[in-house]
Image (cartoon, grey):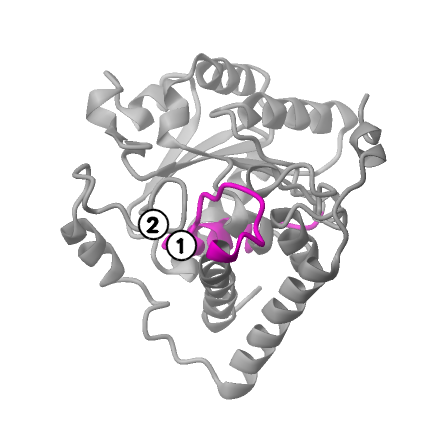
């Protein structure tokens, strides 16, 4: 079990990875649109802290933090963002379609809610095979607007699947608030399907999230029934891109100030040796991406079924 300090260092590493992405993005090295996780690292680290390599994670196109928190290969991550053949998806997926089968980070999609049925299918397969793998499916509150969300949580509950649905609730679908989109309360609605439901508001500390999720995982493994979890979230950057968007008018800096005041990564003291290790790992991964070749025309036909 990782200590709070270890979890904070892991979250800080993820933030620094994305801050380097922000730095190099204007150079056009990165050949992909970006949905950054800055401000939400504690959720990813906490959700993944008690998962084994065999446990499977499905998430959204805002997936950098989860890919890294699950243990995804860092050089392959940067190579993928740069569209290189050594990327985790051979340069064909980019930021919104990351996957790493070595750690059962099962892939992401640019289509909202599309990984929900994939996660349900994986959990159903695990049940049929009789293994102990846990499936975690992470999505935003905007995904609950989609019909496949309702079908997925219904089927998971009906079939009693070992699956945890995790809603990152930032009250937004791009720029639209839940009050403009949903005539139902998320948790009340999920409970009506017979799911055990859980909610955490103060998610800035990865240790708090980790402890919260660990008890839920234990319950799901014990009962072999799915759970539904709402984690409050706040992204520091714009919906897509590397800039800020507080001037757009759908949210304010006051919200940012309230959230960031509880952010343990702001002002986190990291030892010189640890910071040097982080710097070296990130720079080596960037250099790997830069030195890697682009896919060839022949590569277009590989991995196509």
- Pointers 1 and 2 in contact (CB under 8 A)? yes
Left or right relative to 115: residue 46: left
Q: Is mark 2 on a helix, strand or loop?
A: loop
Up the image or down, 63 lies above or below 278; here it is above
Q: Residues within 10 Å of mark 2 (few under 14, many from 20)?
A: some
Q: Name the residue under label 2.
A: 237
Which of the pair 193/298 is nearer the observer?
298
Placement of the N terminus among the 4 image quadrants: bottom right
Measure the C-alpha gap from mark 1 to mark 2: 7 Å
Which of the pair 50/69 is nearer the observer?
69
Q: The magenta stretch spans which residues? A: 26-53
Left or right relative to 245: residue 300: right
Q: How crowded is mark 1: few (under 14 residues within 10 Å), some or many (20 or more)?
A: many
Q: Mark 1 points at which residue?
A: 38
- Magenta stretch: helix, strand or loop mostly: loop
Query: Which residue does the image show at 56% across and 81% down from the upper left?
Result: 276
Q: Is mark 1 on a helix, strand or loop?
A: loop
Quadrant in which residue 168 is drawn: top left
Percent across and percent down for residue 65 are: 51, 51
Percent across and percent down for residue 268 are: 37, 75
Up the image or down, 145 lies above or below 235; here it is above
Query: Which residue does the image show at 52% across and 43% down from the upper left?
Result: 63
| Residue 186 painted magenta | no
């Amino acid at each position: 079990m990782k200590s709070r300090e270890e979890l904070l260092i892991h979250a800080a590493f993820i933030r620094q990875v994305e801050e380097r992405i922000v730095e190099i993005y204007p150079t056009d090295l990165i050949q992909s649109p970006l949905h950054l996780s800055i401000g939400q690292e504690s959720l990813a680290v906490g959700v993944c802290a008690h998962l084994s390599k065999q446990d499977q994670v499905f998430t959204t196109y805002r997936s950098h933090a989860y890919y890294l928190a699950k243990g995804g290969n860092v050089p392959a991550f940067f190579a993928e963002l740069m569209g290189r053949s050594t990327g985790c998806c051979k340069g064909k997926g980019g930021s919104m379609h990351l996957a790493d089968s070595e750690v059962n980070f099962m892939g992401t999609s640019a289509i909202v809610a599309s990984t929900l049925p994939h996660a349900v299918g994986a959990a159903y397969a695990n049940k049929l095979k009789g293994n102990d793998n846990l499936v975690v499916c992470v999505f935003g509150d905007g995904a609950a607007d989609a019909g496949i969300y309702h079908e997925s949580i219904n089927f998971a509950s009906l079939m009693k699947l070992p699956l945890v649905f995790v809603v990152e609730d930032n009250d937004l679908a791009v720029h639209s608030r839940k009050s403009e989109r949903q005539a139902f309360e998320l948790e009340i609605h999920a409970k009506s399907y017979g799911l055990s439901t859980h909610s955490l508001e103060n998610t800035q500390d990865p240790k708090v999230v980790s402890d919260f999720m660990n008890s839920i995982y234990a319950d799901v493994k014990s009962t072999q029934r799915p759970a539904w979890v709402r984690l409050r979230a706040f992204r520091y950057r714009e919906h897509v891109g590397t800039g800020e968007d507080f001037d757009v008018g759908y949210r304010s800096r006051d919200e940012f100030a309230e959230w960031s005041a509880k952010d343990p990564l702001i002002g986190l003291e990291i030892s010189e040796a640890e910071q040097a290790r982080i710097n070296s790992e990130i720079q080596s991964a960037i250099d790997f991406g830069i030195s890697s070749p682009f896919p060839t025309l022949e590569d277009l036909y590989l991995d196509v079924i």
